[in-house]
Each structure stands twice: as structure tokens, then as C-alpha cells.
Image: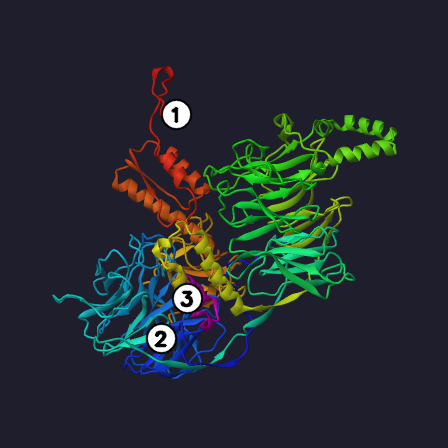
Amino acid sequence: MKKIALLSFVFFTVIHSFAQNPLWMRYPSISPDGKEIVFSYKGDLYKVSADGGTATQLTMHEAHDYQPVWSRDGKTIAFASDRYGNFDVFTIASTGGEAKRITTNSANDYPFDFSVDNNNIIFGSARHTVNTNVRFPRGALFLQLYTVPATGGRSILLSATGMEHAQYNSDGSMIVYQDRKGTEDPWRKHHTSSLTRDVWFYDIKANSYTKFSNYVGEDREPVFSSDDQYVYYLSEKNGAQNIYKAPIKLKMAEQQLTNFKNHPVRHLTKAKDNTLCFTWNGEIYTLKNDGQPKKVNISIIGESKTNEERIVPVTATNGDFAVSPNGKEVAIIFRGEVFVTSVEGGITKRITNTPQQERMVEFGADGKTLYYPTERNGSWDIYKTSITRKEEPYFYASTVLKEEPVIATDKEEFQPDISPDGKELAYLEDRNVVRIMNLATKAVRTILPMGNNFSYTDGDQYFEWSPDSKYISIRSAKGRYGSSEVVIYKADGSDKTGTDISRSGFFDGGQTYAFDGKAIIWVTDKYGRKSLAYQGSREVDIMMAFFEQDAFDRFRLTKEEYALLKETEDKTKKDSAQKAKDSIARKNWAPDFERIDERRFRLTTNSLNLGSFTLSANGEKLWYTATNERNTDLWEMNTRTKETRILTRVGNGAGFTPSADGKALFIISENGLLKYETETGKTTPIIIRSEMVLNTAGERAYIFEHAWRQVKKKFYVPDLHGVDWELMKTTYAKFLPHINNNYDFQELLSEMLGELNASHTGGRYNNQNPNADQTASLGLFYDEFVGGDGLKITEVIKGGPLDIATSKIKAGMIIEKIDGEAITNGADWATLLNRKAGRSVLLSVFDPSKNERFDESTKPITPGAEQNLLYNRWVTKMRELVDKLSNGQVGYVHVQGMNDGSYRTVYEEVLGRNADKKALIVDTRFNGGGWLHEDLSNFLAGKNYITFKPYGQNAEGGE
């Protein structure tokens, strides 16, 4: 299935292009003399006259270049680029030329301003903070302010308070900046909360901070006026984000300089004469002498660094696949396209070729038709592709195919399931309604109406035909939320209520028929261990119920009893007349729901972290995938003896589909497709030899449409907070032709979704570069406020690689060399630890207290591992602070994430360390999200309703 995830581009070429009216120009920076503007367009930097005209391309690199900043003499431009896997500070001459890398730490660095003398650049960095900082240790959330020589060298920390868009005043004594208080998408609009940004001043000499703005909404991107008497900044205080001019000390009212409607002003910069430069609605404007904004008319003659089409190899790892009835073909979904591959021979054919997404593919009963939903023409519809030539029995070797719609209405239709007799199609309508279409007459009937189920994410509903096509089993919530049952309906639509088979009140679903329809198996979380939190992992068991007594009785026989019965039956050969009677009886067979509770039982003996499961045709073996710790295995259980064994290790995320005859299991995992033969135990990889031409621009256009439709169909309130969503689509779609990379596309999605003024929205993109730089961590804090040679240690982090009994390294010592390379003032020491996590490094250390030097080896850790240590340290510091300020009377606990693990930590801390406290601070700041609010509320809001008094004494804690 095509993910709403963004993908990095790897093939590049040079194509001349001309844009008369380019849009989505971002991050403009006006030159100090006000004559030129540098801006980012399609991931490169361009320069244009402030009066408009044809822009000149300054950078052309496969990486993303943006956030340009002019030096005060106008000779140099600093910018951010991810040329080494993360954003570093680079410089380039304002006239063009080769770019030079200035910072080398693998944490993201973003340039803000040049020093007054142009010798240094201040930048924000996601590096970890100093040991005296009490802020939450997430570098990407609270950027540390560093300065670095403009020619490169060692970075020096200026402030660890967390600054964005920091700008010097005219003499370099003050910095104005915007703060950041927590996690929220930066492009969200019109929200008023404790997280919105404010404008602050930082007095460098006094090392003091003063808050300047006080609006409850967004105040951001401040710059000093040239005489340092005013601050220009952006604010939403009167609707759309506009430019304001506010006096710093003068007793004058602030002015609103622009009055743009509907869209925010972004990316404010200033020249020496106070000419302002900014963007609005994807274009660049200037404003002189506090007058009226003027659009800068720009044309671009540039070179495209990417092909819109690129070749990608086809793989099968996402779990969306189907096996043909004859077991000789497998249909897979890759990047939203349908492919069919031969089980033997490795021949693969592409079936669909659209920018839109296809998914949930199914073979027809004849094996010559494929059914799949596709999101075209403004809704999800179900299409089919058929082999047209009788001489061609297989899709993978076919030449002429015919695609046509099966169900195409303005409603959402997907998740097709063909009846075993091939005559009818069951499907979901609008995500919750189960309907059936007769393929011959096109007549449609409803089996499960609206109001029974509540889909949270596509693919979370489940239904399956009985082998005789007369019944359909559905996982139904029965109008409730938090549990579900297995309910069987007559497929002809005459049964409006269905028969509840599970009747447990727990989660039951994932059902599949067994014994040719005489039984059904499904999963339940009734018996297994489950998260304390409502949302979390749960162990499940496989349940089974029989629809007739005879089959149930036979299944319950012991191994010995069943062998004796089979021996007797084999001696008694049925004549043709008896076989005819049996055939008639089978044709007229109907499930017996009476006393089915007595024929329902737990099939598995132990609860499992279960994946796929199926019974053999004779019911003697149960095959399933289960994850134990980090490994996923294929298991087999003898249903009579209950003996289990591992058949093979199949890879994480594994699931399978059995062949129609039950002789093979087709397994998909992170390792690709496998065929496991149930009789011989032979495992064979299924080779996919294919590649596809991916239209990247078409894919972005589809993802944009998909995201827009997801909001329209699934947003939690139908009025979408009063936003004209049709207008928003038109407004933002016009920028798509001007975007060729996923950083810009991510911002486009976030800008559009930000119009909703809702949390948990926005586009996300992480560039995956296996060769990216990674600055390993020694598990130390350093004094980064000073330069010079060597690294002075201020603290050894608990749990780090040097927090061991044998280490001599302590706070106050100085690391002089790493692997024999000296740490000097003129070089960035991060290069000495690049990609060395887990590898032995030699530290040369000087101990000034003893005036001695020594060497010590250690194995650095990854930045992620260091982040975990810093989090634990921060929690300890917060706990100690609360304990100190309350004289030990108030407890403290931090909720790291709204998940089961955090709930268990809260439970442990509250009833353990803090059981005797008079009050409790529950800190939910900076948590990673999830679904724990109800569990926490119930746990923390409990009231005493009973008192236990063993031996006449009150025993607390059992209330």
C-alpha cells in the first residue's frame, strides 16, 4: 500500500526550465543594501534584484539548500543544506561559486545572522545542551544558539535557552529572537495556547532575558530596526499573520504595517535602510519606509536537478498481497501499484500505472480477474483488471489486459472480497457499511448498516465469506467502542441482526472459516496479557466454534480415539448411493447456532503476540506466526496433542496467506515473499524481477489530494472548524508544479493542514540517507561556552560509556585528543567522532588537578542512545527539584508517552516512591503522544470508598 510518507530522490539530471511566474518561493533574505534578494526555490538558492527581474541560480545540488542569510558587508551568504545527511551551515560568495561547509556536527544546524564584524555566524543547533540547563533535553525542540567563525572552525555556545530566528542589533550587544515552548507544527495557524511563540530580547553582556510580546497567539520572526529603536515582527493578533512595528522603549503605539487577508506573511528579513522583505501566498514582497507592500515580479531560468520520472526496483514487504486460486501467482502492491509475479520463475508484470493509489488487491474466483480499490476521480472506487485472451492463463505472462470500474459512486468503496462461487462481491462503503453486489445484475444490498462499526484507520474492518457463499462473518462493534464480536449474517440480506458467535465483550475478530465452513476460528484478547493502558499491545488467543455437533465431537477426540475411528471408517466403504445422499445433505447444510456456546472453546494453550493463522484442511494442524521478543517465527500446533514447534524464522512483521488447497503458506515480511510448503517444510523465496517508472510529481499531487480528502472525510468535526476546505485545496494545489522535493512538499502539506487550527496535523518528512554523518557521543557534558584547544568535561552522564568503575575520566578534566587527533580551536571536533558509535576510540586526557596526562579507550554511543540517558537525567533533576521545594511533601512523575510503558512508570512512581506524599505533580509536557488520558484520569482521580482495618489498624492502598 502506498504510504503517506515522503521519499528521497536519488537520480539527477540537468534540464533547463523557465518559470515566468514562479510560486512557492520561500525563505527570502534581502541584502544589507536592499538591492538584492536571495531566496529558496525548488531546494536551491536564487538571487534576484529587489526590483524584480530574472533570478540567477546560486546553488545547484541534489541536497536541499534553504534559509539564506546575508553577511553585513553583502559579500557572503550563509545557508542550511543537508548535503551530508543533516542540515549544516554552509557559505557561498554572494556572486556565486563553490559552497563551503562550516559546521560538521550531525545535529541539524540553521544559520540566523552574521556578527557585526562579519567574522562569525550565529546559528541554532539541535545538539544537546549544557549540564546546567533545566530545559527538556530535546535538541530539535529547543535549539541551542552557537557562534562559529565564518570561515569554519570550532563552534562556541552563546545561549542554551532555546532560540529561533535570532538576530543581532546594530552593535551586536543584543539579540532578538522567538522562543519555542513545546511541540506543535510550526505552520499551524490562529491557535492560542501556552505553546505559541513570543518575542524576547537577550542582553549578551548582562546574560539576561526580557520578554517583549504578550499576545496569547503567535508572535514570531523579529528583527531590529536599523536604529535599534523598534522591532519588526509577525503576529496573528488581528487575524492573518501580518507585519507589526513596535517601539522597544519609546512610548508610542505599535503599528500594523501590512493587512494581508487569508494567508500568513512569512520569512521576514530587513535591509539596513529598513526595507522589509517577506513572502505571502508563495510570492516575495518588499515594503519600504513603512509604506505599502510591493510584489517582486520574478522570472527564473534555472536547471532542474531531478527527473520527474525515475526507475525504482519493485519489492514486496508491506503485507498487501493476494494469492491466485491455483497458487501459481501472487499479486502485490508496491508504491500504490498492482503487480503480479509468478511463484516460480521470477516473472513480474505491472498491472496498473497511475499516480493514484491502488490497494487491497484480490483475485477473482477464476484467477483471471483482479479486483482492487483505487482512489481516482475524487473517491475510492473498486476496479477490476481481466485477462482478455483465452490463450493466456496467467497475469504475469499476459499481453492484453482490460481495466474497468466495478463500483464507482461518490461514496467511498474499498476492501473487496469475492465470494467463493465468484458470483458476488462484498465490500466496505464509507469505511463502516458492509455491502454485497451481485456481479451479474449489479444489484447491491446492505448487510451491516451504518452505526455498528467505527473505523479508525483504513483496513481495520474485517469480514469473510463462508465457503458455500451463503453466509458472511463480520467483526462488529454493535455500536459500541472498545470491543467487537464475530457476527454471522446470511449473505442474501434476509438476516438483519446476525448471530453473535463470540459473545465475549472483549475484542474478537480476524475470523476465518475452517472444516469447509463447519467451524470458524478467530482471535480474542480475553485471556492474554494486555497493556495497562487502553491503547497498547495485547496478547491474543485463537478461539474456535463449530456449527454442527458431529464435527465438534470428532474434533474433541484424542489422537488415539481419532485413529481408531478412522480405521473403522476406512474399513466401511461408502457406496455410490450413500455418496449421493451425502452430497445432497452437504448442499442443503446450514449452520446450527443452537447451543453454539457449548461448542465454542479456546484453541490455543498460551496467549501470543499473534500475526496470521490458519487451520489445515483436516483440522489436525494450526499454523500461525508469532513474535517472541524481537523475532517472528512460523509455528505449528497439533490440535489434538497441543504440541507446538517452530517451523522457520520468517522475519519481523511477517504474515501469511494460505493457498486455496492448504498445501502452501505464502509469507510476507521485511525479508520479502516466501512460499512455505506445509507437507515438506520446504521454504522457497519468491523472486520479484521488476522495476517501475515512478512519476514523482504525479505522486506528490496524489498525496496532496489524498491528504485533503482524508481531512474532508475523517476530520473529527464535520464543519472542519469553519474552514472552506474546497477553497484551501484550490489555494494550495497551485503550488504543486513549483515543488520538486519533499522538504517543500512537507511544508506545503503543513501550511494547508495548518488552516484547520487543529493539533496533531501537518506533513512530516525524514530524509533517509544510509551514508549520513553521525556524531557519536562519549556520554559527557562539556564547557562549550569557551573555545581554545581541548574539551573541558563538566559532567559524566550516568549510564554513559564512561560511567564505569574502571574509568579515570572525571568532571574538570580536558580531552586533548581523539584517536591521536588534537582538538584545536581552529577545527570542529565533531569530525573526530563521526560514525564511530560502537567502535573503540582512544581519548587522550589531561587532569589539571594532578597535572598529569593519560589515555583511555571507550566505545561511544549513538545520539539516540545519549538522548535516552539525558531524558532519565532530566526526570531525576525535576524530581529532586520538586522534592527540595516542597520539603519532601510533593511527589513528581513525568509521563514520557501516552502509552503502556509510561503508564506502568506512573503506576510504579505513584504507589512506590511517592506513596507517602501529600500531593503529586504529574508532568505531561513533551510526551510523545498516544492514548493514555482516560487511564491516567481514572487512576489519579480515585476516591476512598472503603478502608481496610486488619487487626484494627488502617491499611492504606487497598481502597
Mark linked to residue 958: 1
Residue 372: horizontal and vertical position, in percent? 61, 55
Give the amino acid at mark 1.
Gly
Which residue is label 2 attached to? 150
Give the amino acid at mark 3.
Answer: Thr
Q: Quadrant of residue 854?
A: bottom left
Report the residue at 24% width, 60% height from top.
237
Within 10 Å of disc 1 (Cα), the crowding (few <14, some 14-19, many 20+) is: few
Q: Quadrant of residue 286?
A: bottom left
Give the overall secondary structure of the magenta segment.
helix
Q: Position of residue 180 (x, y in %)?
A: 32, 58
Proximity of marks 3 and 2: CB atoms separated by less than 8 Å: no
Say what secondary structure mark 3 lies in.
helix
Instruction: Identify which amino acid the numbered label 2 is placed on.
Output: Ala
Is 445 contained in the magenta span?
A: no
Work out which quarter of the rendered image holds the N terminus and state it: bottom right
Q: Is residue 506 placed above or below 192 in the rendered structure? A: above
Query: Which mark lies nearer to you, 3 or 2?
Result: 3
Query: x, y (%) of residue 348?
Result: 70, 62
**Residue tagged by mark 3?**
730
**In 3D space, how far apart are the residues under numbered discs 3 and 2 (Cα atoms)?**
43 Å
Q: CA distance from mark 1 to mark 2?
A: 65 Å
Q: CA distance from mark 3 to mark 1?
A: 60 Å
- Label 2 Cα crowd, 10 Å radius (few <14 / some 14-19 / many 20+): many
